[in-house]
Amino acid sequence: MWALFSRRARLWLITVLVAPVASLVLGRLGVALEKRNGPSTISRGLRGGSRLLDRTRSKAKAKRRS
């Protein structure tokens, strides 16, 4: 089914659906891990991944607007 979508439609689906969900999940896992065990390399990495996805999405959004 994935092959039925054009390249642009697949990119749009990833940007609109997958990236925000992944960012949310990574952020919540990082926060939960920090609450449980305190700050660690893994929890900071998860939260950093969440921030990276957020930044990437906001840059793509700004690029589309201009």
Image (tube, rainbow, N blue to C red):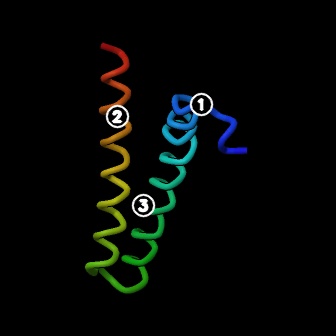
Which quadrant: the C terminus?
top left
User: Disc 2 or disc 3, which is closer to the eye?
Assistant: 2
Which quadrant: the N terminus?
top right
Question: Sequence order check: which comes first, mark 1 or mark 2?
Answer: 1
Task: Check disc 2 and give the amino acid type.
Answer: Ser
Task: Check disc 3 and give the amino acid type.
Answer: Gly
Tell me if residue 61 comes above or below residue 52 in the rendering. Answer: above
Q: Position of residue 26 (x, y in %)?
A: 44, 63
Seen at 31% across and 51% down, the residue is 52
Crowdedness of circle 2 by 10 Å Cα count: few (<14), some, many (20+)? Answer: few
Q: Position of residue 21 (x, y in %)?
A: 54, 51
Crowdedness of circle 3 by 10 Å Cα count: few (<14), some, many (20+)? Answer: many
Q: Would residue 15 appear left or right of 56 to someone viewing this image?
A: right
Q: Cβ–Cβ below 8 Å for labels 1 and 2?
A: no
Q: Would residue 66 appear left or right of 27 to someone viewing this image?
A: left
- Name the residue tied to disc 1: 6
Crowdedness of circle 1 by 10 Å Cα count: few (<14), some, many (20+)? Answer: few
**Nearest the eye: 37 or 26:** 26
Seen at 65% across and 42% down, the residue is 3
Question: Sequence order check: which comes first, mark 3 or mark 1?
Answer: 1
Q: Position of residue 10 (x, y in %)?
A: 56, 37
Seen at 50% across and 55% down, the residue is 22
> Residue 58: which disc?
2
> Residue 27: which disc?
3
Task: Check disc 1 and give the amino acid type.
Answer: Ser
Instruction: Say what secondary structure mark 2 lies in.
Output: helix
Q: Position of residue 46 (x, y in %)?
A: 36, 67
Quadrant assignment, res 44: bottom left
